[in-house]
Image (cartoon, coloured by chain):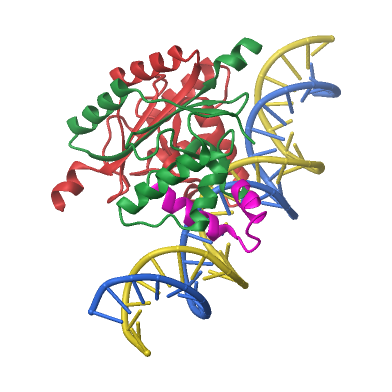
Chain colours: A red, B green, C blue, D yellow
DNA sequence: ACCTTGGATGTTATTTTATATCCTCTCTAG
DNA sequence: CTAGAGAGGATATAAAATAACATCCAAGGT
């Protein structure tokens, strides 16, 4: 089992289900299982890592099973994709529509989500200045986290 | 041949070669060909698109041929990877060490590189505040470019 | 209750992206 | 002249993602 977090996994699953329902979408058993696996993980998971874990409870799972669930969860803004890792992780805060900003530690592989309003707004404005209509922004910063840095 | 740009392709290749030499690296014929193909393209190219084009002048080219050249060019900061597209494009400005910031138009597929100091610094500080030692930052904004927006 | 219809999932196959491994060639520093 | 490193050749395979079609099932209208 993973480290302690702000809220329990069942509580987060339930509020995710409510958020989906509010938009007329259904957090089905499969989607709930996939989200639960991600919430239970200490770090980002690739689609195939997720598939391996999912198979423990759902033998018939194959890549499309996982990718469809991931697509749904991303549409519902319940998870993010970390592009540099081809991996996925839950949003830090369910339902709240924020741009994705990550700090990726190359030593330990952990990824922290941050939320920097200044940067987000600067990017929004920069896009506007070009007449560009932004839909979704991703920020990914590679480096070394505090813990790994001090260890070295 | 692609649209007109600030500087001629040969001039950009030569300054790239100089930048490499200054760091004790060699812009070999293969690497030069790959960079030339990218400079000659109107938009980002995937590794396999590049491979197809490269084969016109180098029949023996296979995936590792291209990926090795791409790795080298990225190390030398001559090109960027656009993570959301699994594609590559030249740096807007050779040699100058800037964070990668892209506007990706989902209609026309064009990618514009921007350079927003405010956002870059905000992110740097946000990382520092967490004790995170940033190495390289990527910003990718999906949306619709001005041209495509007005067409619609 | 009975359709029917669209969303969700099952199933098979394939495409796209990227890397591992080992070998050969060619410089160049000693 | 030769050892060693870096570049590239060659083969194979791994990893990530999607296409296409079949089936199931749940919700709403009648």
Quadrant assignment, res B148:
top right
Quarter of the image that includes the C terminus of chain B = top right
In the displayed image of the protein, which residue is found farthest to the left? A150
Residue situated in front as seen by the camera: B21 or B134: B21
Residue situated in front as seen by the camera: B132 or A35: B132
Q: What is the x, y in percent for residue B55?
A: 65, 56
Residue situated in front as seen by the camera: A78 or B85: B85
Write the residue at 30% across / 48% down.
A106
Quadrant assignment, res B151:
top right
Residue B17 seen from this side: yes
Quadrant assignment, res A28:
top right
Q: What is the x, y in percent for residue B67?
A: 51, 54
Write the residue at 44% across / 32% down.
A79
Magenta span: B49-74
Quarter of the image that includes the N terminus of chain B = top right
Q: How many marks?
A: 0
From the viewer's perspective, is residue B48 above or below residue B42?
below
B119 with respect to D25 (left or right): left
Residue A51 seen from this side: no
Write the residue at 51% across / 31% down.
A73
Residue B115 in the magenta stretch? The answer is no
Q: What is the x, y in percent for residue A126?
A: 40, 17
B139 with respect to B107 (left or right): left
Q: What is the x, y in percent for residue B31?
A: 49, 54
């Amino acid at each position: 089992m993973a480290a302690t977090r702000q809220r329990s996994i069942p509580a987060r699953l339930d509020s995710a289900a409510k958020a989906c329902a509010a938009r007329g979408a259904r957090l089905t058993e499969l989607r709930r299982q996939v989200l639960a696996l991600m919430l239970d993980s200490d770090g980002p998971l690739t689609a195939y890592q997720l598939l391996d874990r999912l198979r423990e409870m759902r033998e018939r799972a194959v890549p499309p099973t996982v990718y469809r669930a991931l697509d749904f969860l991303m549409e519902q803004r319940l998870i993010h994709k970390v592009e540099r890792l081809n991996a996925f992780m839950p949003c830090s805060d369910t339902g709240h529509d924020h741009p994705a900003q990550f700090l990726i530690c190359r030593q330990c592989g952990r990824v922290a989500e941050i939320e920097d309003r200044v940067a987000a707004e600067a990017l929004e404005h920069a896009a506007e200045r070009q007449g560009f209509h932004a839909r979704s922004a991703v920020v990914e910063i590679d480096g070394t986290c505090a813990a790994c840095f001090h260890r070295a």
